[in-house]
Image (cartoon, helix red, strand yellow):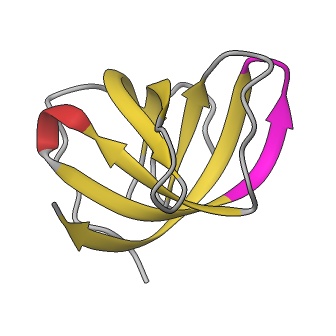
Amino acid sequence: MGVEFVNFGMNRVHGDKRRAPRYPTFLAGQIQVGEGHPTPCVIRDLSRSGARLELHPEAAIPATFELRIMSREAAYTGKLVWRDQERAGVRLEVQHQT
């Protein structure tokens, strides 16, 4: 299941071979787990089905979490796909109302 997505007039990430194209972004985000304190992140690219995040290297990310995109007032169920120091790849599954 994909998520609602708007292309802000940006070009697709060069060399990207994913089924859903990713677009470069610089969006403020938050990783939320339950009622705990949110973890800030920057969403560096985004597609209908996933995103690449930048965050503090010591920030903990569980396998499943809520990803909030602050400027869109949107939240998605995110699933961690990979993690490399200050970056993480996530799959976006369900959009929630905020």
Coordinates of residue 24 in the picture (x, y in percent): 40, 24
Residue at image coords 50%, 62%: 34
Horizontal relation, residue 93 to residue 62: left or right: left
Horizontal relation, residue 28 to residue 47: left or right: left
Q: Is residue 38 magenta?
A: no
Q: Nearer the viewer, residue 56 or 83?
A: 56
Q: Is residue 81 magenta?
A: yes
Coordinates of residue 93 in the picture (x, y in percent): 47, 73
Residue at image coords 58%, 35%: 52
Coordinates of residue 50 in the picture (x, y in percent): 52, 54
Q: Nearer the viewer, residue 33 or 79?
A: 33
Coordinates of residue 86 in the picture (x, y in percent): 74, 17
Q: Is residue 73 visible?
A: yes
Residue at image coords 32%, 24%: 28
**Residue 70's image quarter?**
top left
Q: Which residues are magenta?
A: 80-86
Q: Quadrant of the N terminus?
A: bottom left
Q: Main secondary structure of the magenta part?
A: strand
